[in-house]
Amino acid sequence: CLGGGCTKVLGGTTAAGLRQATASDARPIVFDEFESLETNQKQNSAIMDLLRQSWSFSTSAVIKGTTSGNATQYLPNFSALLGGIRVHFNNDADRSRFTVLELKQHDGNAQHKYALEKALNALPGDFGERLWSRAVCKIETIKTNARAFQEAIALTSSQRLGAQLGYLLAGYYSLVSDHEITSGDAKKFVSSLNFEEEKKEVAERDELQCLE
């Protein structure tokens, strides 16, 4: 659905491969079959380090040495969507940087699967490109709405959660409205959402889990 506006990779991809493929590219990564298994724990850990660097955007580059004696530098600046069956975060910092989306259970209902496939197949071939074009045209509105959502979430939860979810909610809002959201409407929108699970994860800090 996203067309050529993203970099699509599969499980088995390495952090070094991602760095070389993306360099300083801001296109998002769509990573399928990213499984948290013991057999690929070291490889996934390196990828998580790269994603962590990208989340904490900075103008400082990551510099790597090469066998030729010439250093190569990267500036991770992308978002990522990871798909997998098993979700596991090793520390509190990663739990607050990732938002987990779970598919709604349909109990093997064949009609549900058919309806989903029918809806996806109905999308035009240039849907991804059109979606990116619209987002670029609305980027200033999305940024303004992200700040409004961040402030609204910070009032009821934490600034860290606001920083994580502000842009996600602004992206969603851009699909249903062309306008900037008011502070009052942002607070009303946020109040209709349930952040209990996210608040619980923020509260369960690593040092407290260790004591338990």
Image (cartoon, rainbow, N blue to C red):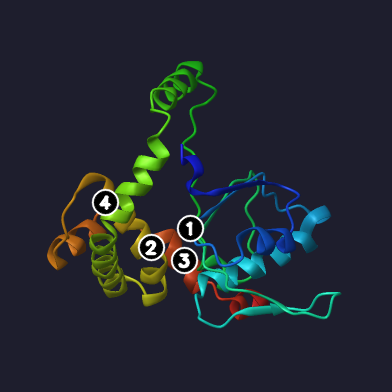
Q: Which mark is residue 200?
A: 3
Q: Earlier in the sequence, mark 1 or mark 3?
A: 1
Tell me the amino acid under the disc marked 3. Lys
Q: Earlier in the sequence, mark 4 or mark 1?
A: 1
Q: CA distance from mark 1 to mark 3?
A: 13 Å
**Of the residues under marks 1 and 2, which one precedes in the sequence?**
1
**What is the number of the mark on residue 165?**
2
Q: Secondary structure at mark 2?
A: helix
Marks 3 and 4: which is nearer the front?
4
Q: Residue at x 63, y 71 (%)?
A: 91
Are the residues flagged by discs 1 and 2 in contact, CB closer than 8 Å? yes
Residue at 77 percent of width and 60 percent of height: 43
SS label for mark 4: helix
Residue positioned 46% across, 36% down in the render: 1
53 left or right, relative to 179: right
Q: Identify the mark nearer the N-term, 3 or 2.
A: 2
Amino acid type shown at disc 4: Ser
Spatial distance from mark 4 to mark 1, Cα to Cα?
A: 19 Å
Residue 44 at what x, y percent from top left? 72, 60
Please give the residue where the numbered disc 1 appears in the rendered image: 99
Position of 162 compared to 33: left or right?
left
Q: Quadrant of the C terminus?
A: bottom right
What is the secondary structure assignment of the residue under circle 1? loop
Q: Element type at marker 3? A: helix
User: 144 or 196, which lies in front?
Assistant: 144
- Residue annotated with mark 4: 174
* Dot 2 crowding, Cα within 10 Å, few <14, some 14–19, many 20+: many
For residue 122, which quarter of the picture? top left
Q: Is residue 57 above or below residue 107?
A: below
| Closer to the camera in the image, 138 or 49 | 138
Question: In this rendering, which labeled residue sits more in front, label 2 or label 4?
Answer: 4
Q: Residues within 10 Å of mark 4 (few under 14, many from 20)?
A: many
